[in-house]
């Protein structure tokens, strides 16, 4: 399911870091501005965390890791707490098997967001960040 989240809420800039997906999207989305920790293929977790921190620091952004029950490595949350990280917003994902549904005739599907959608979205997250 986490991989579906990554695809559904992509960031403008992504990099594979030893299997983790480093994401930087600007704006207020924590998902698009955090590391997805679905899998880890590296040999040195601490060095990978250091790399993540350097990358976000270079962008003037806080380092964030999106952890969940199947995060790799399994002790990542413990390692992050030892470095002073604390939990943020909690997301509860519920899902069911998809059912075929015919879209209403007035629904338009686009491969990329159009200017109108971006104006609404960016306006909403800008307002939420001011609150």
Image (tube, rainbow, N blue to C red):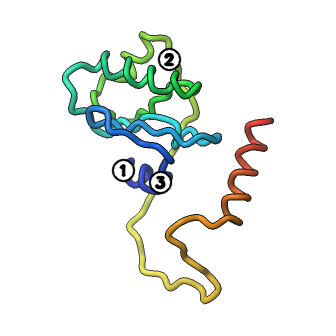
Alpha carbon separation for disc pair 1 and 2: 23 Å
Position of residue 82 relative to residue 130, above or below, is: above
The picture quadrant where one finds residue 69 is top left
**Residue 60 position within the rendered picture, expressed as x and y whole percent measured from the top left:** 59, 25
**Residue 95 position within the rendered picture, expressed as x and y whole percent measured from the top left:** 44, 58
Residue drawn at x 70%, y 51% is 122
Residue drawn at x 42%, y 18% is 80
The picture quadrant where one finds residue 76 is top left
Label 2 secondary element: loop
Q: Observer-nearest residue: 51 or 125?
A: 51
Residue under numbered circle 3: 94
Residue under numbered circle 1: 3
Badge 2: residue crowd in 10 Å (few <14, some 14–19, many ≥20): some
Label 3 secondary element: loop
Position of residue 63 relative to residue 30, above or below, is: above
**Residue 25 position within the rendered picture, expressed as x and y whole percent measured from the top left:** 54, 43
Most distant residue in the front direction: 58
- Front label number (1 vs 3): 1
Most distant residue in the bottom direction: 105
Label 1 secondary element: helix
Q: Observer-nearest residue: 9 or 11?
A: 11
Q: Earlier in the sequence, mark 1 or mark 2?
A: 1
Quadrant (top left, top right, bottom left, bottom right) of the C terminus: top right
Q: Observer-nearest residue: 31 or 23?
A: 23
Alpha carbon separation for disc pair 3 and 2: 26 Å
- Front label number (3 vs 2): 2
Alpha carbon separation for disc pair 1 and 3: 14 Å
Residue under numbered circle 2: 85
Position of residue 130 relative to residue 8, above or below, is: above
Would residue 114 be found to the left or right of residue 81 on screen?
Answer: right
Q: Earlier in the sequence, mark 1 or mark 3?
A: 1
């Amino acid at each position: 399911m986490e991989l579906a989240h990554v695809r559904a809420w992509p960031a403008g800039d992504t990099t594979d870091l030893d299997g983790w997906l480093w994401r930087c999207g600007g704006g207020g989305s924590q998902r698009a501005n955090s590391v997805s920790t679905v899998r880890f293929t590296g040999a040195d977790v601490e060095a990978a965390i250091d790399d993540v921190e350097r990358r976000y620091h270079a962008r003037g952004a806080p380092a964030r890791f999106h952890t969940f029950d199947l995060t790799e490595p399994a002790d990542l949350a413990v390692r992050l707490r030892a470095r002073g990280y604390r939990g943020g917003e909690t997301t509860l994902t519920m899902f069911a098997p998809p059912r075929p549904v015919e879209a209403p005739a007035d629904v338009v599907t686009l491969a990329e967001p159009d200017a109108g959608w971006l104006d609404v979205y960016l306006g909403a997250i800008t307002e939420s960040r001011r609150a």
